Amino acid sequence: MSKLAALWETTSPLSTVELLRHLITERYVGRTVVTASLRARSVVVLKLISRIAPETPIVFCHAAQLYPESISYRERLIATLGLEDCRDVDSHVANLDQSQPAPNDHDHVERIHADDLVGGGTVFELVHLNNSLADFDCWISAVYHEKPPAGIKHRVDLDGRLVKVNPLLRWSDADVRRFMLANELPYHPRVAAVRPEQPAEDRETSPLYSY
């Protein structure tokens, strides 16, 4: 039986919480990392992680600039959930080129939405994670800027040398809303707001913002 088939057999019957607990505390102890944004599905995963192992490294993925309310919201989440190891995608690998994959591996990326406040509209950006993920074997991918392609059945897959996990693959939008409400988790301020105004000092030099 292949490595992936064995993982499917073990993890397929597990609930979301059981899956995360199995990966973090049994199979990949000290070798699991989470990538996240500030969207509701990410917040759900962060809440679950905080219950299981709040020391799990969290790498926040975003465009070059964050809305000021995003910074405040993230600080509030980290404090409320008691997350102990939160990083920006480049904060712990300064001066290293994240776009270069390791030998015998391939490029690990998250695909995010970013608002173009000068040209208007929304664009996609790739956030390269090769150095951020270098010390880990299991990657819980919880950025959730996009829905997964139709036809994906398994929450656990391989991405190069890494085991990559989509923990909320089975969750509907209604499931997310119920969880957010039941756990009194706040939504990002931008969810209920019209597109926020870009900070004045950045209008000319930093057109892409995300959360």
Image (tube, grey):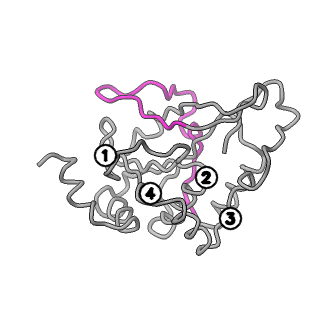
Is the residue marked by circle 4 packed among few (<14), some (14-19), or many (20+) residues within 10 Å?
some
Residue of label 3: 186
Instruction: Look at label 3 and name its amino acid.
Output: Pro
In the displayed structure, would residue 176 be above or below residue 96? below
Outermost residue toward the bottom? 182
Tag shown at residue 39: 2
Residue of label 1: 157
| Viewer-closest of 32 and 158 | 158
Q: Secondary structure at mark 3?
A: loop
Instruction: Look at label 4 and name its amino acid.
Output: Leu
Outermost residue toward the right? 200
Residue at 35% x, 63% y: name it: 19
Instruction: Look at label 2 and name its amino acid.
Output: Arg
Question: How far is the residue under mark 3 from the one under mark 1?
Answer: 31 Å
Q: Position of residue 197 (x, y in %)?
A: 84, 41
Q: Position of residue 18 (x, y in %)?
A: 35, 68
Tag shown at residue 168: 4
| Viewer-closest of 52 and 96 | 52
Question: How far is the residue under mark 4 from the one under mark 3?
Answer: 19 Å
Q: Secondary structure at mark 1?
A: strand
Question: Which of the two discs, 3 and 1, labels the residue nearer the N terminus?
Answer: 1
Question: Which of the two discs, 4 and 1, labels the residue nearer the N terminus?
Answer: 1
> In this picture, which residue range is highlighted in magenta?
83-111
Residue at 57% x, 36% y: name it: 90
Q: In which quadrant is the C terminus drawn?
A: top right
Q: Secondary structure at mark 4?
A: loop
Q: Looking at the image, do the residues carrying marks 1 and 2 touch, with CB atoms under 8 Å apart? A: no
